[in-house]
Image: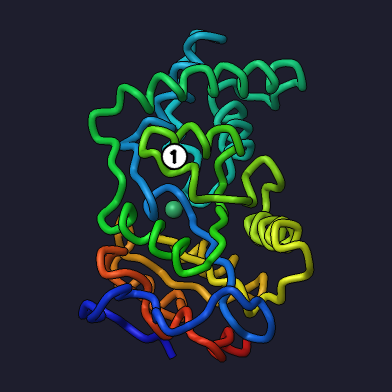
Amino acid sequence: MTQTHSKPPVGRGAGVDAKVSATSTSGDLRAAVLFDIDGTLIVTDGAGARSWELAFADLWGVEADITDYSDTGMTDPEVGRRTFEAVMGRSPGAPEFARLLERRMHYLSQTVAESSGYRVLPGVEELLPRLVEEGYVLGLVTGNLEAAAHVKLARGGLNRYFSFGGYGSDSADRVEVTRTAMRRGSVVFGRGVPPAAFLAVGDTPNDVEAAHAAGIACVAVASHKYGMEQLEKSGADWVIPSLEHGLPPLAVQVGQVPKAR
Ligand SMILES: [Mg+2]
């Protein structure tokens, strides 16, 4: 059953149970937390879409609004390919696609830097260092190309918290992106880490679905486009309004394992 946490946990280290030792990665102890980026850690206020638009205008002189052809949760390569097919009326050749990805990354640095609505979401700047201090290793699970993820996080000074990740450049399938992050997490730990030791944090039903398909529990945060009710319906293990009061204590406690599904 989804547990809704709208009241702030109390005490030092609120949000994670400070008594839990995360230094051991055996059994069911949570050891690593995997964060989605857009809408969970930051919002770029359209900087991503704007970078695609500039790339299409630069290369082919066409107007391309990716929001017409893509959904949240789609990976970057998929967004680029679908948008190309829609505005150009054909599939991109390999050299064209390479140029598109390069131009898009070229403009992304600019659009992220110029975005007046860029912000790190409430609670993130407090939560990430606290999780690290308490011994959790942090990773990313995102549809962004790896380089795009780091450009977006750099403006907020958040890259330093993340030791590994799964990216849109690893697979078009978000479940596989999640599994890739888990494999890389095991590399960082130096040994296999069981699914129950991971916890995912995301802001969309897609994030919840991918986490569950990969066998890990998910905290859904209603910090962007989806409300608490929609996220509860998605089957998230926990739903919280924002990261302002940390993660639900039970989400990071010993013995909490994903629901059978
Ligand atoms: Mg998101």
Vertical placement of residue 190 versus 78, above or below? below
Whether residue 229 is visible here, answered yes or no, is no
- Give the camera-side residue of 113 and 134: 134
Q: Position of residue 137 (x, y in %)?
A: 56, 62
Q: Where is residue 127 in the image (x, y as percent from the top left)?
A: 35, 61
**In the structure shown, which secondary structural element does the residue marked by tag 1 occupy?**
helix
Q: In this view, does 256 lie to the left or right of 189?
A: left
Vertical side of 42 occupied by 216: above or below: below
Which part of the image, by quadrant, shows the N terminus?
bottom left
Task: Give whichever of 197, 65 is nearer the camera.
Answer: 197
Instruction: Name the residue: 56% across, 37% down.
Output: 79
Percent coordinates x, y for residue 104 in the rendering: 53, 22
Query: Which residue is pictured at 22% across the width and 77% down the height?
Result: 8
Q: Residue 52: x and y, percent? A: 48, 25
Q: Does the residue labelled 1 lie within 8 Å of ligand 1?
A: no
Give the residue displayed 53% in from the left and 33% down from the top.
Answer: 148
The reply, left or right, for residue 147 in relation to residue 222 is right
* Amino acid type shown at disc 1: Leu
Disc 1: which residue: 153
Name which residue lies at 48% across and 55% down. Answer: 36
When asked about the image quadrant of residue 236, the answer is bottom left
